[in-house]
Each structure stands twice: as structure tokens, then as C-alpha cells.
Image (cartoon, rainbow, N blue to C red):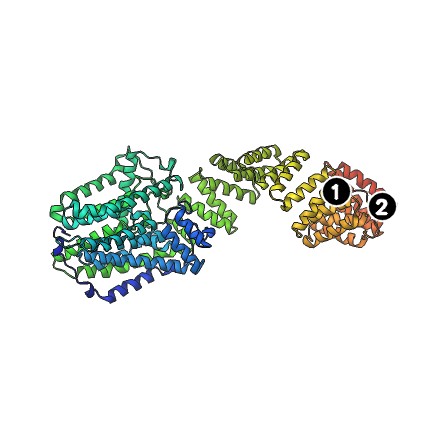
Amino acid sequence: MKSSSPTSIKSPPLRRTPLALSLLILVTAFIAYLPALNGGFVWDDDSWTTNIAPLMQDVGGLLRMWTQPTALQQYYPLSSSTFWLDHQLWGAWTLPYHVENLLLHLLSAWLFWRLLLRLHFRNAWLAAAIFALHPVMVESVAWITERKNVLSMALFLAAALHYGRFTGFWQPDTPKGSQRSWWAALVFFIAAMLAKITAVVLPPVLLLLTWWQTGRLRWREDIRPILPFFLPAIALGLGVAILEKHYLGAIGPEWDFSLAQRCIIAGKALCFYFTKLFWPDGLCFIYPRWQPDSGNLLHWLPFTATGVIFLGAWLLRGRWGRGPAAALFYFVGTLFPMLGFMNAYGMRFSFVADHWVYLSSLGIIALVTGLLSALAEKLHRPRLPHLTALIILPLLAAITWHEAHQYRDMETLWRTTLKKNPRSWMSHHNLGVLLQAQGHLAEAAACYQKVVELKPDHYETQLNYANILVATGYPKEALSHYEKSLALRPDSPDTCYTLACVLLKLGRFEEATTRLRNALQLSAKRADIWSALGSARFYAGDAQEAVACYEKALKLTPDHVDTLNNLGNTLMTLHREHDAIVYFQKATAVDPHSASAHISLGSAFRILHRYREARAEFEIALTLQPGNITLLTQCAWLLATCPDDATRDGDKALALARQAVQNSGGGQPVILQALAAAYAETKHFPEAISVAEKALDLAKRQSGNSALAAQLAEQLRLYRLSQPLRDPGTA
């Protein structure tokens, strides 16, 4: 592909390029990407679409995308603006998002073809077709988030075309175009960087193209016009790099590599991308992340081989032409930001990714097409590129069609990735999150367990795994994972709070108190933490402090039903029933469907001998929880033993007590006590005696039930005297 005299390499005029060929490539591309067009949002698509609802609601959110660099994951306001517009037009309907990505990709292929034609590149159509159908591009096209890539590419190429028009497409002795083309190129360039910062490489790329075409770089004609392009490139490039490192978190032990290790990473990455462009087998959404060993000579082979190839292309430029050197320099130069010399957040998961080579692929595709054209000329086989296209384009389209299937939904994407890369901890974690949300806790736990093995320092996995263990009845086993997550993120009040709640369930009240006080040091205005601390102090035996904690929680959230109910119950233990009723009544007013609040209010009324009100509250609670054994027992006891004739109802008490016995299995002495009282109230004293004797026998056999056994003995004496009970206490 000798380019020392580019004017001698003529391509057909634009009008002679067959329209049928363009339409064929367009239709083939749509068919190849068809499996992904109806796909949903995957991975971090929600970070640019559904999870940023406040930004999507109005024009104010759109302005924030432009004026607030940290409003989104990355400062790409032009790309995010397209998502804002999509949200207004389509909402969560993903088909238009995918179609737009594909159309932008095809527009880039068309602009690539136009640029090569202007550079008098033979068989430019083949290079554009390869780019349009190559499966390495699937990640950029089928993944909605990578709108950034395809939009930036189209603007990048448009800027190159306009700049080429301004300079006469770098042809010797060609008069310059209008200043308007220069300004258009600058505008398109800035827009490309605002879509994605990878376009920052355009100024050196334009100088490289000038050198390829003319063999020289002149200050006035070639260098000075491009200098203003470097100013926004440096400003935006540095700004995005700072955000990537300090806002996204591309810093820490996962990026702690020496210069030698970074050279090894770069060499292997270049060989990896070069290989995938030639042989796109084994493509994967998340590739394995290798460990560079600067002391192993084998690890230096890719870096050394790459250096030799580039040195050879440079030294042989006089014999081969400047084309191969220019293509290789373009490939490396555009990939340089993603070769490991600078921290990129995505390298936390892998050192390589298909969408990182999207822009750089143009150089290798052009090089291969140029070499094929040169070979056809040397062999006097002008149809060789067409025959090659008949073989490789359908093959590329078929692989693209196959790869596009994995973007159907998130579960398909993660399962497909894990088949190809079983050690991808991030894929295991994300699949676990998805399965957990679907309620498949056992499978989700298996995913989290795998992450714990592969990456034990992943905070979110430790926390999620602990939550599943609690949900599936293993709170003790969860404690170590909560402790690990807290060690990884000691500034997380949520983790402190969650760990404390588990400790409460396990009856470790003092430890729970300590954790909750730590959480309050991190976030003193969390009502849920104050409320949990109230519960911890209550169960630890400090009812006075519990009341104070609940009151602080209610100052922050006055209408929290559980806190109102808990405060009321605590006041009951302090024999402040009248105060407790105030909180119970407020709880039932806030949530009339809270059965626990109605039960607590009914119990308070019963203690104060307000029997009719107590019965009313119990009956409301029964409509809400008709199978609640404790409620059935309390209501039956009240109706059987109440001294108020208007409230007492022996027949109903008997029905409720029988239901409680049936629901519980008949092995609880307290429930049998209520049934015996109901039998006595309905004058069935033989049945009352029999049931009371059984309850007494159970109470005697159960440790800690001596008080109940004494009550039952006294009640049994009354039943034998054919006397019913009258409010002897609480069942």
C-alpha cells in the first residue's frame, strides 16, 4: 500500500459507487444486529437512562448534565443529552435506542468510506463494509450505554472530513478550502469529545494523515492550523481524566502497577486487539484480567514484538510506503489512553474491552484493505477484493448476529459472559444481584459465594451475601460477612445498621447497641437507626433510654408506625398506659391497616378496663390478620373472662379459642388456658376441666412456666366448682 505518491492511487468517482452495494450492506447490518434490537437495558445502561429520573424530568435536568460535571458517571453531556431526548420520546422502550445506535454506527461506516475516498483509497467500500459488519463492533452498537462510542465516532469522522476539505484533503499543491470548513471541523471535534473523550486524539491523527499523504509537516500550512484543536483537547482530556480517577474511583491497589508492568499490559493489549480484529473468535463482554509479571521474560514478548513491528514499518517506509507505518501509528496512538499507562475505571474488571478498540480499528481495517488492494494490483487480479468480500463479509455478519444475541437481557449477558470467563467476579456479582431481585435466593447466594472466593474485598458482595443468609435463616453465618463488609467500608452507616439488626435478632443487645451508636456517629439524623437503638436498649433492660431513643426517632419521622408502636409498648412496661394509648392511636391513624398497632391499643385498653374499646380494636385486628394465633388467643380470653357483661361473649370466645388451638397444633398451654376459660364461660365445665388439666400438665413440663402453672391450678379449682373466670389477668 505505497502512499509516497497518493495522487497516483485513484478510486472511482463517488457517483460510480453502486447504490445497490450500499443498500446491501445496510440491510445485512440490520439483519446481523436483529437479535439485539429488541434487547433491554443491560449493566450500567440504567446509569444513563432509568436510574437518573430527576435529570430526565425536565429541561433543568438537561442543563445539569452540561453544567455539573459529576451529574452522571462521566462528563459526556452530548451523549447524555441524546438519552434525555430518547427518554422524552420513548421512555423505557428500548427498540429506538438500539436502532439509533445502529444507525450511528452505519453513519460512521459511511463517513469512513467517504474519508477514504477523499484520500484516494482503493476499495474504500470494502473497508467500510468490514467496519460495519465486524463482530468486535457489536459491544459498541448493541450496548445502549455505548451510544457514547458510536456518536463520538460519527462526529470524529465528520470533523476529519471537514478539516480535510479545509486543507484540500492533504493533497500536494491543492488550494485550501474556506475558513468555514475549519470552523466546522473544530465544532465537530469538540462535539465528538463531549460525546466521548476518546475523540481527543483527532489533532495528532490529522497531523499523521498529513504526513502520510505528503511525507512532510510544514509549520504554516500543516501545524499552525491544527494548534487551536489542541486547546479544547487538553482541557477536556485532563478534566475527564481527573473525574475518572477521583470521582469514578480509578485509583487504588487494582491500578497499582509499575511502569514495567504497564508496558507488559500495553504490549499484550495491543496484540490482543490486533488478533481479535483479524480473528474475532472468543469475543467476551468481560475478558479475563491477567497479572503482569515484569520478572518473566515471556511476559515481555508481546511488548517486544510490537516494538519490532513498528520499528520495521518505520524503517521500511521508503520501500513499502508510508501507509503501513501511518496505519500502525494510528492504531497505537488512538488506543494509547486505554493501554494501561493511564488509569481507566473499566480496567478494574479487565485490561481489554471490545468497545475500547472501536475507534482504533479503522487503522487496521484500512491497512488490511490497502494491502489486499496492493496484492490484487501486483497479481493483476482486480476482482480479488470482491471475491474476498464474498467470503469474509457473510462470515463477519454471521458472527455479529451470534454475538448480538447476548444483549437480549441482563441475565443472558451475564450467563453468556460466565460461560466464556468463569472467573469474572463482576459477572458473578451482577448475576447474583439480578437473581436476588427475582427472588432466586439460593442461586444468588451461590453467585455471591463465588465472588467471595474470587474477590473477597468486594464490599457490595459481602453485604448482599450476608443479607441473603439472614433472609434464608442463617443469621449467625451472616455476621462474618457483615463484619467483612464493614471493615471494607467503615464509613457506611447502612452496614452498621444492618449488622446491628442481625445482632438484635440473635439477642446480642449490647453489641447491637455499640454498632448502632457507631452508625449514629456517621449519620445522626437517621430515624431508623434511632428506632433500632431504642429496641436494643429496650431488650437490654433500659426502658428509659429506649423511650428517649424512640422519641428522637419520632422527631425525625413523626409518622413512622413501627416506632410509634414500639414507643407505646415500652411505655406500657413503665406502667404509663395512658401515654402509650396516645402513640398507639396515632399509629392506627397513620396506618389503619397495622394489625400490630390495633393489638397493642386493644391490650392497653384492656389493662385500663376499657373493655368495649379493647374488643373493638381486637376485632379490627382480626379482620386484618384472621389467622394470628396470639391475637386469636387474646381476643378469646377477653371475651371469655371480661367482667363487663356487654363485652363478654362466650360463644365467640369459644370459636376463636378453637381456631387458635387448631392453628397452633394444640401444644401451647397459654392457648389451652384461653380455650378452658371459653368452655367455662359457656357452662361446659367438664370440657373446661379437661383442657385446663392438659394445659397444667404442659406448663409443669416446660421450664420457666411455674407462674403459669400456678394460675392454671387456681383456675382448675374454680372450674371444678363450676365457676367461670372474671378478668383474672392476661392470658
Q: Please identify the quarter of the rendering in which residue 101 is found.
A: bottom left
Residue 149 visible in image:
yes
Residue 615 is situated, as x and y percent measured from the top left of the image, at 76, 51
Q: Alpha-carbon distance for marks 1 and 2?
A: 34 Å
Number of the label disc, if any, that sits on residue 578: 1
Which residue type does callout 1 highlight?
His
Residue 630 is situated, as x and y percent measured from the top left of the image, at 71, 47
Q: Secondary structure at mark 1?
A: helix
Mark 1–mark 2 contact, CB under 8 Å?
Answer: no
Q: Which residue does the image show at 86% across and 45% down from the upper left?
A: 720
Q: Secondary structure at mark 2?
A: helix
Residue 669 is situated, as x and y percent measured from the top left of the image, at 75, 43
Q: Residues within 10 Å of mark 1 (few under 14, many from 20)?
A: some
The residue closer to the viewer here, 694 or 214, is 214
Against 442, residue 261 (above or below) is above
Residue ranking furthest to the front: 179
| Mark 1 vs 2, N-terminal side | 1
Q: Please identify the quarter of the rendering in which residue 551 is found.
A: top right
User: In this image, 297 relative to 430: left or right?
Assistant: left
Residue beneath disc 2: 719
Residue 688 is situated, as x and y percent measured from the top left of the image, at 82, 48
Residue ranking furthest to the right: 721
User: In this image, 672 relative to 428: left or right?
Assistant: right
Quadrant housing the C terminus: top right
Q: Residues within 10 Å of mark 2 (few under 14, many from 20)?
A: many
The residue closer to the viewer here, 487 or 491, is 491
